[in-house]
Image (cartoon, rainbow, N blue to C red):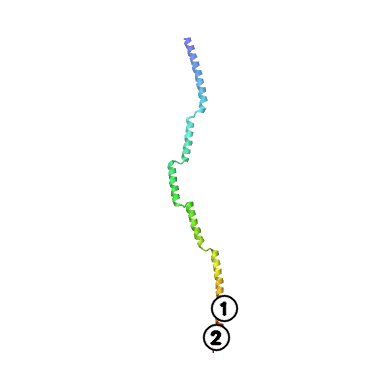
Amino acid sequence: MDEQITQLDRRLTSVEKEVAVLVADTASTLPRHATKEDVAKVEIRVSVIQSNYATKEDLVKLEAKVSAFQSIFATKDDLAKLEAKVSAIQANYATKGDIADLKLYLAKLETRMTVWAVAAFVSISSVVVSVVKLWP
């Protein structure tokens, strides 16, 4: 029986050594492996990231909105065409300076015509007076 106890004692000692080795191995591998808490933290972070990113459906909706805006608003080409038309129109219209020059020209013309009219009246009056005096 003593022999059995000794044998059991050796086996127990051997098991304790193996358990100690397993505990040491487990302790050394724990930092390299993720725990359930670590996985839960990562899942939370992933869900936050997913909530911030657009899905394919979101992109389809956005593309629809962009195409609607593009159909409503003018493009740069449309603006360039419009600017060309406005430039052509502006080339044919008078500016304020042109109108001021025209008014000045008309005022000078009016003055000149008035002078000519008065001169013509005086000349005709002189001719009429001369004809009346010379006519018997």
* Tag 1 secondary structure: helix
Give 49 or 121, whichever is nearer the viewer.
Answer: 121
Give 17 or 1, whichever is nearer the viewer.
Answer: 17
Tell me, for residue 47, which label it has, or none: none
Q: What residue did someone put label 2 on? A: 131
Give 3 or 96, whichever is nearer the viewer.
Answer: 96
Which residue lies at the image location 50% right of the left edge and 14% below the top edge?
10
Which residue lies at the image location 44% right of the left edge and 43% below the top edge?
59
* Residue 51 image offset from top left, x and y in percent: 46, 40
* Residue 110 image offset from top left, x and y in percent: 55, 73
Q: Is residue 25 above or below residue 113?
A: above
Q: Is residue 60 above or below residue 123?
A: above
* Nearer mark to the viewer, of 1 and 2: 2
Crowd band around label 1 with a 10 angstrom C-alpha radius: few (<14), some (14–19), many (20+) = few
Which residue lies at the image location 48% right of the left edge and 55% below the top edge?
81
Q: Amino acid at mark 1?
A: Ala
Please indicate whether residue 71 sits to the left or right of residue 109 in the image.
left
The span from disc 1 to disc 2 (Cα, nearest Å) is: 18 Å
* Residue 129 image offset from top left, x and y in percent: 56, 85
Tell me which corner region of the image, top left, top right, bottom left or bottom right, holds residue 62.
top left
Q: What residue did someone put label 1 on? A: 119
Q: Amino acid at mark 2?
A: Val
What quarter of the picture does the C terminus occupy? bottom right
